[in-house]
Image (cartoon, rainbow, N blue to C red):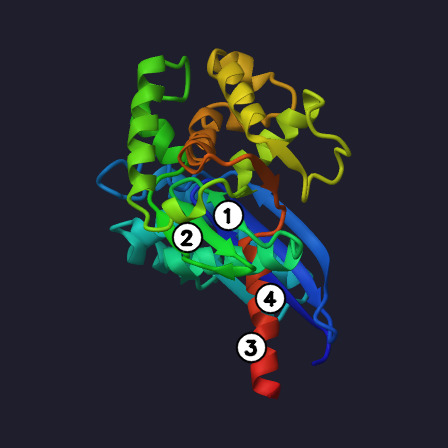
Amino acid sequence: MQDRKIAIIDLGSNSTRLVIEKLHSNETYTEILRVKEDTRLSQNMGRNLILQEEPMARTIKVLQKYRQKIEDYEVSEVYAITTAAVRSAKNQAEFLERVRDEAKISFRVLTGQEEAHYDFLGVREALPDVLNGVILDTGGASVELIPFKNGQALAEVSVPFGAVNLSERYDLADTIDEANIEQANVDIQAAYRQLHFIDACQNLPVILLGGANRSLAKMAEEKELVYHPKALHGFMMPANQVGEIFHQIAQMSRTEREHLAGLEKNRADIIISGLLPVLNLISVLNAPQVIFSESGVREGLIESLFEEKEQIND
């Protein structure tokens, strides 16, 4: 395989990312460009699951900029993927048609299982020494869970709650009512306990992906709970420290969270809801620790491209 340049656009419920990578013949790759904008596509979708005009318009505006960058970098292969917000939207077809017309980008809508599978491929390649655990990728409108033992996935599932829709559903954006957190905990744990693998994965570590979980790592770093701040990938944190950080920020107002060291200001309204999935997964698994991974769905997609080339060559 000759070296080739590809672009991956990852349109999520909370953010839209573009990476441009050079893939090498030895199945390694070099990052050329990485950009991200918080587009909040799933904002105010509500239980009717309708993408709203303002989030759609600002997302398309960002995608138009990304299309220009792809042209500037002379990239010929573009892999555009989108996840939970578009996957669940009743007006999915209309939105994707607008994107094709206005941004000249055609998206592949990943199923929850496909998203989870790419997460697993990305983590397996990036953390080869972690052979047992449960991967948790917390997005804006879904979480993906992949339990694995001896390096093999036992399941690849998606559950339809995430940082944005939990914040809206339980009113967790501003001053927090403890009763709302308690109700969210009850509902999330009930959803987790319906998953067939929970009992078989007791006491395994949780491997964390996603923006909310990266924020957790950065807040831990600011509290000097995590060291070597420029390399959070692979760092382990005792599970009790996750609870400590959560309970501290749950006492803060939104304004106080906006000025919290280690937390991006624009995540202040969704950080409480964004940490509820990991907090409750730790609880139902009795997990001893969490491990941070900076490799996930985009890296897993690249690994799948390498696997496809191997199959063609075989």
| Sequence order check, earlier mark of 3 and 2 | 2
Disc 1 versus disc 2: nearer the observer: 1
Q: CA distance from mark 2 to mark 4?
A: 18 Å
Q: CA distance from mark 4 to mark 3?
A: 9 Å
Disc 1 versus disc 3: nearer the observer: 1
| 136 shown above or below 282 | below
Q: In this rendered view, identify the residue nearer to me: 223 or 103.
A: 223
Neighbor class of circle 4 (other Cα within 10 Å; few <14, some 14-19, many 20+) is some
Q: Residue at x 45, y 24 (%)?
A: 272
Q: CA distance from mark 1 to mark 2?
A: 17 Å
Give the residue number, with chain letter if any, for mark 2: 83
| Sequence order check, earlier mark of 1 and 3 | 1
- From the top left corner, tell me how far across and down residue 293 is, in percent: 61, 46
Q: Secondary structure at mark 2?
A: loop
Give the residue number, with chain letter if any, for mark 1: 135
| Sequence order check, earlier mark of 1 and 2 | 2
Q: In this rendered view, identify the residue nearer to me: 284 or 254.
A: 284
Labels 2 & 4 near each other (Cβ < 8 A): no
